[in-house]
Image: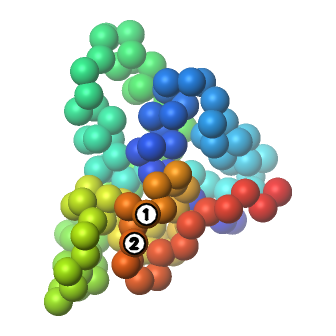
Amino acid sequence: MEKVVVDTDIIIDFLRTNKGLLPRLRQLQEKGVLEIYISSVTIVELFTGDMRRTQEKMLSDLLVNFKVIPFDEEIAKFAGEAKRGKRLQIQLSDFIIGITSIYFKADLATRNKDHFQGMKGIKFWKLAF
């Protein structure tokens, strides 16, 4: 089964417009074609913004559809080794999300491919169905 790590921007698009790529990903997951994941860093990014209690509940309800990959010691070491000696112009949160997808041999679903420039081994998810 194909694995896809969903970037924060995909979830934000859905929360703002109730459309975008996320409904299609969830549909494919329901059909058993792929499994969708998010990094624990994405949860930090999502809950950082101002929101009302109803929005927070909606977000929490949405997150049950994902398997959460924690940023643990194993991924932290992998990230450190991947970044060692490189001067990447990537925000730390994007780097961790990208490295998580590489570590789990999963494609990354994002609209912001340029945020991950220079990351060796990253594969972006393309709708192939």
Q: Tell me: residue 128, above or below residue 78.
A: above
Name the residue tied to disc 2: 117
**Callout 2: 10 Å neighbours few (<14), some, many (20+)?**
few
Residue 110 visible in the shown view: yes
Residue 103 vertical position relative to residue 13 in the rendered view, above or below: below
**Horizontal and vertical percent position of residue 61:** 47, 25
Quarter of the rendering containing residue 99: bottom left
Q: Secondary structure at mark 1?
A: helix
Amino acid type at circle 1 is Asp
For the residues labelled 1 and 2, the Cα–Cα distance comes to: 5 Å
Q: Amino acid at mark 2?
A: Gln
Q: Residue at x 49, y 24 (%)?
A: 16
**In terms of secondary structure, where does tag 2 sit?**
loop
Instruction: Where is residue 129? Give x, y as percent.
Output: 82, 57
Name the residue located 25 percent from the left edge and 76 percent from the top edge.
Answer: 88
- Report the front residue among 38 and 89: 89
Figure colour scheme? rainbow
Q: Residue at x 42, y 26 (%)?
A: 59
Instruction: Check if mark 1's residue and mark 2's residue have beta carbons within 8 Å.
Output: yes
x and y percentages locating residue 49 in the rendered image:
26, 28
Give the quadrant of residue 102: bottom left
Disc 1 target residue: 114
Check the image and report above or below for 42 versus 20. below
Residue at the farthest right position:
129
Tell me how many marks there are.
2
